[in-house]
Image (cartoon, rainbow, N blue to C red):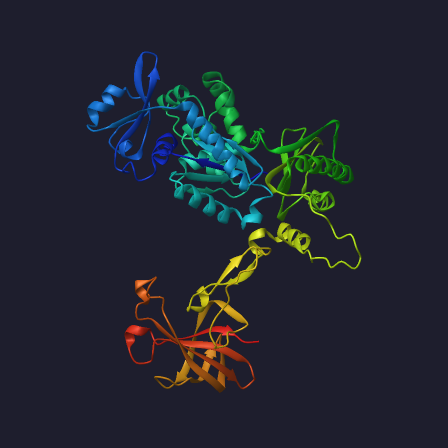
Amino acid sequence: MSRVVSVFLANFPTNRFRRALGGDTLPADQPLVLAGSNGRRRVVTAANESALRQGLRPGMPLAKAQVLVPGLRIENADPEGVADALERLAFWALRYTPVVAADAPDGIVMDIAGAAHLLGGEEALLEDLCRRLTEAGYACGIGVADTWGLAHAVARYGRSPSVIVAAEHGRESLAPLPVAALRIDPTVVAEMHGLGLETVADLMSRPRAPTTLRFGPEPWRRIDQALGALAEPISPGRPADVAEVRRSFAEPIGAAETIKRYIDTLVGKLCLELETRGLGARRLDLICERVDSLRQVIRIGTAMPTRDRARLSRMLCDKVEKIDPGFGIETLALAATMVQPLAASQSPSSLVEPSTPDVSDLVDVLANRVGSKRLFRVAPVQSDVPERSMARIPPLAPELDETWTGQWPRPARLLPKPEPIETVALLPDHPPATFTWRGVRRRVRRADGPERVFGEWWKRDAELAAVRDYFRVEDDAGERYWIYRAGDGEDPETGSHHWFLHGIFG
């Protein structure tokens, strides 16, 4: 089943213009419109948020807009440039899924089926996508649904900027939306409004034949597409310079062994193409085009650039079981959507010559099973605050020269977040005599401390006077814990004087 993301880029032409000027060069509250020609008239083709708040609308005569908003900034529209920018944005979104296309004139659309779990799920993908677009200066609304039509509708007419429609709940989500959400001609929408048909539910409550005779087949075709009764495939875009190989079949294929055999053939051809260019693959996308116009997608990634045919073929074939061939696959397309330079290297030619251990194959297998974001190494960071003294880096990142400093021991396991504990302790410098953690009371037999850790006042004003006193304690069972008191035990401004458990020693 497809899961489609539709990204609605409100005011994309004006946001693109402001971004081209350098962001802050044009104040956000400066009303701005882009003007083009409509016959012999000059009309507004796009307006920014400030201009929209003052009553300007696309399609309005430019002379009228100048009268309504004194000081209005007017720039020439560039529809070809906007279309190219939207296409480039779709290429940028290939980082999320192989099936991405521009959804002119104001958005992009992508099929994330089979790819969302590699990025932590749909919500994590949407959060990352929205954050990146916002940081780039684009206001956006995002909808996720089973079909392109429904995702497009909720992204533009949903009640919140990000809407996720649960699988098989399309009818309930589509019904309350206005008929304009069906992507039909505005004149038809106006005619429906004149007859009292305001929402999709109003239209769906009428018999199909009379409404089709009155408004044409388009409204019901859009409803069928939104509800999944009629297929609406996404034609993915690719940059012209992407290395890609394809294989079309006279008779559709469906057996797993047959698919694996052709995958191996395509991988071999692609590796030869990459070798010619001096490149290695970091990400491969396999698109299976079915006879019913639907697409099945497999994506794999590698930690290091490679042209190893056996490795790439095995990683792709491991996911063949996730392909639903339906009534058959008529075309296989394999593209290297992320590449890096890779020079030819000499492998060890002698049995006595030492070889460098290579764990990249293992890393690739694990990353493609559980997701690349869940596979990482821990690197030291110069910070006195324990939870900030480490960072996640890729598993095959180069070794860093930095290391942790200090003579005090650190626990083998640091909790993601300090957990509050109940203690019996003397103030200001004594360790607790007993403490209760997760409902279990423990008596402290030995203790070492305190180790005083100050807040990073040069980074955060709230930590100007913050202090933690850490103790290493051992209970009657011999288990050792790392606990701390927030504050110095005397001055309330240094902390709450509550106790927390922060780590466990081996």
The x, y position of residue 424, in whole percent, is 40, 84
The x, y position of residue 148, in whole percent, is 52, 33
Measuring 39% from the left and 38% from the top, which residue is drawn there?
A: 138
Measuring 45% from the left and 77% from the top, which residue is drawn there?
A: 483
Viewer-side residue, 220 vs 461: 461
Left or right, 249 with respect to 244, comes to right
**Please, is residue 139 above or below residue 386 in the view?**
above
Measuring 46% from the left and 47% from the top, which residue is drawn there?
A: 127
**Please, is residue 167 above or below residue 148 in the view?**
below
Residue 502 visible in the current orientation: yes
The x, y position of residue 394, in whole percent, is 56, 55
Viewer-side residue, 281 vs 432: 281
The image quadrant where one finds the N terminus is top right
The x, y position of residue 502, in whole percent, is 47, 72
The image quadrant where one finds the C terminus is bottom right
Q: How many marks?
A: 0
Residue 289 visible in the current orientation: no
Viewer-side residue, 328 vs 58: 58
**Please, is residue 70 above or below residue 341 in the view?**
above
Viewer-side residue, 161 vs 481: 481
Q: Which residue ends up furthest to the right in the rendered image? A: 351
Q: Which residue ends up furthest to the bottom in the rendered image? A: 445
Q: Quadrant of residue 488?
A: bottom left
Measuring 23% from the left and 21% from the top, which residue is drawn there?
A: 64
Left or right, 483 with respect to 20, comes to right
Q: Quadrant of residue 237?
A: top right
Q: Which residue ends up furthest to the top in the rendered image? A: 40
